[in-house]
Amino acid sequence: MLEPMGLPKDVSVIAWGLSLERPTMIYYNVDNIRDLFGHKVNIGTTKKNPICYIQNEEKTAKSASDVAQESTQKPKERTFIMIKPDGVQRGLIGQIISRFETKGFKLVAMKLTEPGRAHMEAHYADLSSKGFFAGLIDYAASGPVCAMVWEGDNAVLTGRKMLGATKPFDSEPGTIRGDFCIHVGRNIIHGSDAVESANHEIGLWFTEAELCAWNHHSTTWVYE
Ligand code: DAT
Ligand code: MG
């Protein structure tokens, strides 16, 4: 399928590890490609497709580029995080984003939005029988919220730990709720509580096109 060919030095190529089903969007300069992949590499192109593919002849230990590619090809766990109107009003967006960024999670989507009561009722539908539901919706729909999707290994459970307990009094110092708020009705942030609910919430808040597929340059320094 692949025909060996001489490549101009300034051509970019797409890397395609054997463990991957399709090419990634990581581009390398041909000058450096053999250095990156070592000598166990074929460079070729198909007749139909002018794009040049790199294929490992033999799977060896994961290279840095393999890890980066896998992070693109197989999305890691994602969680939906929302800074509520009080967190936005109190100027906490930056500090909260910073915690997720410095943890090593990857931001996949983010928007400041005011989607209205009906949307908040859908988001909190599982709590509709609770006595505090009406107040919760009043509060959640009272101003803009910062909706985000963060990605990484165990993002859902780790995100919950980073948020702290629902009631700030029960939240450990060092957690977001433990550090930044006092009352359960003003607990500044939402985080998905399970992978299933995360996927549901991400679908409720974002279109597929709003979820950015990108490679974080630090991937190989966050994951071994
Ligand atoms: P969490 O936000 O930790 O997932 P939850 O899903 O049980 O907690 O409740 C959603 C939100 O509803 C919570 O962040 C704040 C509010 N809430 C929960 N329990 C409450 C209570 N007893 N009184 C007032 N508001 C409450
Ligand atoms: Mg919840």
Image (cartoon, grey):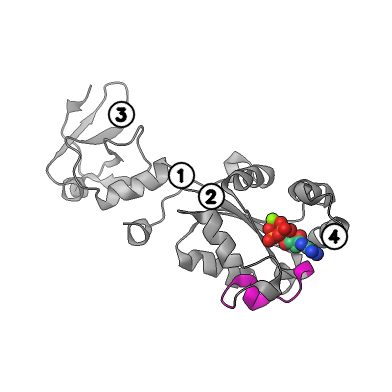
Q: Mark 2 points at which residue?
A: 78
Q: Name the residue under label 3.
A: 50
Secondary structure at badge 4 equals: loop
Image quarter where ligand 1 lies = bottom right
In this rendering, position of residue 94 left or right of residue 68: right
- Three-letter code, disc 1: Pro
Residue kind at label 2, given as amino acid type: Arg
- The foreground one among 43 and 177 is 177
Q: Give the range drawn in magenta.
A: 173-185
> Real-space Cα distance between discs 1 and 2?
8 Å
Q: In which quarter of the image is the N terminus?
A: top left
Q: Does the magenta stretch include residue 117?
A: no
N-term mark: 4 or 1: 1
Give the secondary structure at mark 1. loop
User: Which residue does the numbered mark 4 point to in the structure image?
Assistant: 132
Examine the rendered structure and indicate whether residue 83 appears above or below residue 10.
below
Residue at 42% x, 41% y is: 74
Please tell me which residue lies in front, 152 or 109.
152
